[in-house]
Image (cartoon, rainbow, N blue to C red):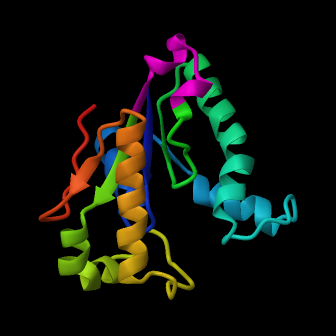
Amino acid sequence: MIILIMGASHTGKTVLAQKLLEEYKYPYFSIDLLKMGLIRSGSTDLTPEDDEELMTYLWPIVRETIKTAIENHQNLIVEGAYIPFSWKEDFEESYLKEIQYYCLVMSEIYIQNHFEDIKKHASAIEKRLDDSYCQKEFLIQENCHNLSMCLKYGHTPIIIDEEYNPEITL
């Protein structure tokens, strides 16, 4: 089984992946770690701010990693913001039946009411060196966009609206 966890920055993708690791013993793969490894090794001239270009660059690697894990009958959680909403188009049906996709979306009300908590938990799993880009309006815009794209592509998002407690049952 492959679990894909997507969402905007600060939605808790890595926290959820860690929780699933502890509960189900499925390893997880952070696309951010792949991104930084490729950037820091000089394998690309892209920077951490080149989001659209990074998705185009990283997705083929991640996609083929997912296929390999499925072919090898391995369980894997893949988490990150670089999973395109059109991801299903890249897999044949035999692969799709082995993949579960989840997109974490914080509502505008949740962000307005819990912004300080969101910032406080930003380094719960990974230590963020620079979190200055994380502003309330940025989070609202990113989450609204992701909700819109989930609906466009027929995905059912996990809406974080009143309290933070996204649940996934395998």
- Image quadrant holding the C terminus, namely top left
| Above or below, 84 relative to 170 | below
Q: Residue 83 vs residue 134: left or right?
A: right
User: Which residue is at the front of the view, 88 or 34?
Assistant: 88
Q: How many marks?
A: 0
| Above or below, 52 relative to 65 | below
Residue under the point 33% across and 77% down = 121
User: Which residue is at the front of the view, 123 or 144?
Assistant: 144
Residue under the point 36% across and 32% down = 154
Q: Residue furthest top?
A: 94
Residue under the point 38% across and 79% down = 137
**Residue 102 in sight from this viewpoint:** no
Q: Residue 112 vs residue 33: left or right?
A: left
Measured as percent of width and height from the top left, residue 75 is found at: 47, 30
Measured as percent of width and height from the top left, residue 60 is found at: 71, 38
Measured as percent of width and height from the top left, residue 52 is found at: 66, 57
Residue 117 figure quarter: bottom left
Residue 70 figure quarter: top right
Q: Residue 110 vs residue 56: left or right?
A: left
Measured as percent of width and height from the top left, residue 139 is found at: 39, 72
User: Which residue is at the front of the view, 82 or 64?
Assistant: 82
- Image quadrant holding the N terminus, namely top left
Please tell me whether residue 158 belongs to the stretch shown in magenta: no
**Residue 131 in sight from this viewpoint:** yes
Q: What range is drawn magenta here?
A: 88-100
Q: Residue 119 vs residue 128: left or right?
A: left
Residue under the point 59% across and 53% down = 31
